[in-house]
Image: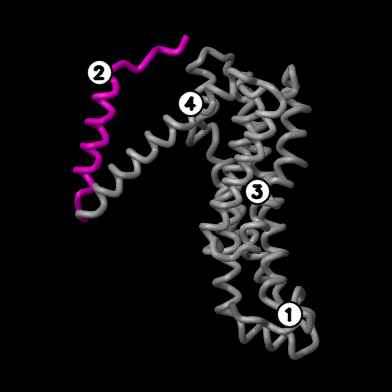
Amino acid sequence: MIPSIGTSGLVFIAALIAATALVVAIDRRLPRQLITAFARMALQLAILAAILGWLLARNDPFTTVLALAAIALLGGLETAYRVGGLRKRQVILRSVAILMAAGALVALPSVLLTVSPDPWYEARLVVPIFGMAVGSSITGSAVAVTTLHRMLRDGRAEVEAQLALGRRFTEATRDIARQAVIAGMLPVVTATAATGMVTIPGMMSGQIIAGADPAEAIRYQILIMALIAAVTAISIRANIALELRRWTDERERFRMR
């Protein structure tokens, strides 16, 4: 059993947050933003705990698949928000579709093949792993698309010069797309390289605290990192390819956005 955090523990946590806010009180807004962020997190986690409790109690195929679809939907909306596309229906649909496809084609089959939950819709295993894999790809996709936008605007003259020489738009923007993919994957590569020596990941720590064998916890963590890398890579490549199409027309002309 995991030791429970009682009332005294909650009081200590609140005091720790308040002390942190005082430490960063260089700007009047920062402490307020920090406390607001923690309050929002607590509310969101309380709602999540209630939803997960209901989900684990039901544990049937329909609710599990519904939960996975909801995760992909919210992840797609968050991705669209980070790239400034919430007002663009095309960006929202694209972001949601990419995450749903990556989750359905990579994350879910990988969990079923490696963890082999019994039954296959075991919410306790499928939902958290799927959520970590899909959710962690949001940052990479947002960084990649944002980098693409910036480099296209900064390098417009060079791209148009190559188009004038008769190159296709995909050829003229190949280096820009490559740099955007690298920028998007960098957080995943950095986090993966630091795991185990510099940082102990949350899932691995949670399993060890819960009494799991450290060797088994390591296997789960390797699975999670591999899924995060795979889903992030697929999401980035798909987002970059589709985003480039929004910057050109049927005549291969540069269309400034």
Residue shown at 27% from the left, 18% from the top: 7
Q: Secondary structure at mark 4?
A: helix
Residue 227's place in the image compared with 151, above or below, is above
Q: Secondary structure at mark 3?
A: helix
Type of the residue with mark 4: Ala
Question: Marks 3 and 2, how far apart in space?
Answer: 40 Å
Residue 122's place in the image compared with 156, above or below, is above
The answer to which of 40 and 141 lies nearer the viewer is 40
Looking at marks 1 and 4 on the same chain, the residue that comes earlier in the sequence is marked by 4
Which of label 3 and label 1 is nearer to you? 1
Residue shown at 63% from the left, 31% from the top: 129
Q: Position of residue 83 (x, y in %)?
A: 54, 62
Type of the residue with mark 1: Asp
Q: How packed is label 1: few (under 14 Cα within 10 Å), some, or many (20 or more)?
A: few
Q: Is residue 11 magenta?
A: yes
Q: Position of residue 64 (x, y in %)?
A: 66, 29
| Magenta span: chief secondary structure | helix
Residue placed under numbered mark 4 in the picture: 50
Residue 102's place in the image compared with 119, above or below, is below
Residue shown at 63% from the left, 44% from the top: 72
Residue placed under numbered mark 2 in the picture: 8
Looking at marks 3 and 1 on the same chain, the residue that comes earlier in the sequence is marked by 3
Position of 155 with respect to 234 (left or right) is left
Type of the residue with mark 2: Ser
Looking at marks 1 and 2 on the same chain, the residue that comes earlier in the sequence is marked by 2
Q: Is residue 150 magenta?
A: no
Looking at marks 4 and 3 on the same chain, the residue that comes earlier in the sequence is marked by 4
Residue shown at 67% from the left, 59% from the top: 239
Give residue 154's mark.
none
Type of the residue with mark 3: Thr
Q: Secondary structure at mark 1?
A: loop
Residue placed under numbered mark 1 in the picture: 249
